[in-house]
Image (spheres, rainbow, N blue to C red):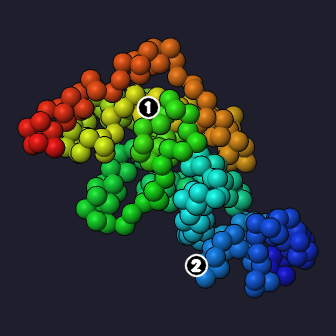
Amino acid sequence: MPDPADPQSLNRYAYVNNNPVRYVDPSGHIPCYGDPLLGECSWSGTGHHTVHQGGRRRDIATYTRFILREVRNPDAGVTDVEAFAQILNFAAGFETDTQAWADDITAVILGTTGPWTLITALPVKFREWRGGPRLPEFGDTGFHKAYQDGHNQIYHWWAYVNTAIQGGWVGTIFVGIPANYIHEFVDFTESLKPPKDRGASWQDYALSYNGLAFGLALHDGIITPDTAADAARWALTTDLRDPVTRWLASTGNGWLPPNVVGAGLDRLLGR
């Protein structure tokens, strides 16, 4: 009996979350959601909710690798939005509080944690750019077209979500909102990137505010970890932009300052 606190673990059918098509139990002790040889097994689906922080994050990391393979499998029909919604549900299985749940996910998706996520994520991305450990590589499939710019939009969105979850209104006003303006209008490091890799866009601008609102709803208890997956599916597939942002987005991304400088460098360097 793998979990004495969970009577359902006596029942081999219920033990795999009443879903023997999706999960398997090769050892008789723990359900697996992917390839057992890759360590893709977890206590989270068994009612065993006393996993320490390191164990939770390892489980979320292996589940993320598994679900990203599903995204890249054209026969699976899983979008980036749906994959991340399933990760939110998976992490909620540990029954931690909202802040710990969000930080567990953030540690895996962004390589950092805490109310300063938008700031502390920068050196992580720099180390990745220099050839360090790579973060999970999502795309933007499943997002409403208002939020699609061809980049890792889960990374962008969740950085703002966790900043608001951990920092509340203080984090939103003093970190999240200024960071959004800086990234889209003042961050000239974007100018140094090749055109296809530049991140300054009205899609990101709108997605940042979407993330801050979502994070505040979690911080205030309007959304909980148990309901976050469905809420995220709705928030990321619905155009929640205000009328001014919609109009600005219709003017295109070319005149955003980092892109203007970048275009000048392109001509100068013959890129």
- Which residue type carries mark 1? Gln
Element at badge 2?
helix
- Residue at (82, 69) in percent of width and height: 20
- Which residue type carries mark 2? Leu
Q: Which residue is mark 1?
A: 203
- Residue at (61, 35) in percent of width and height: 237
Q: Where the C terminus falls, by quadrant? A: top left
Distance, label 2 to label 1, CA atoms, is 36 Å
In front: 157, or 191? 191
- Residue at (32, 50) in percent of width and height: 122
Residue 19: x percent and y percent? Answer: 82, 65
Quadrant in which residue 118 is drawn: top left
Residue 259: x percent and y percent? Answer: 24, 32
Which numbered disc, 2 or 1, marks the residue that appears first in the sequence? 2
Q: Residues within 10 Å of mark 1 (few under 14, many from 20)?
A: many
Q: Where the N terminus falls, by quadrant? A: bottom right
Is residue 58 left or right of 151 when viewed as pictured?
right
Residue 146: x percent and y percent? Answer: 50, 29
Residue 217: x percent and y percent? Answer: 62, 34
Disc tally is 2
- Residue at (41, 45) in percent of width and height: 151
Is residue 104 left or right of 257 when viewed as pictured?
right
Q: Which residue is mark 2?
A: 38
Quadrant in which residue 186 is drawn: top left
Q: Is residue 107 visible?
A: no
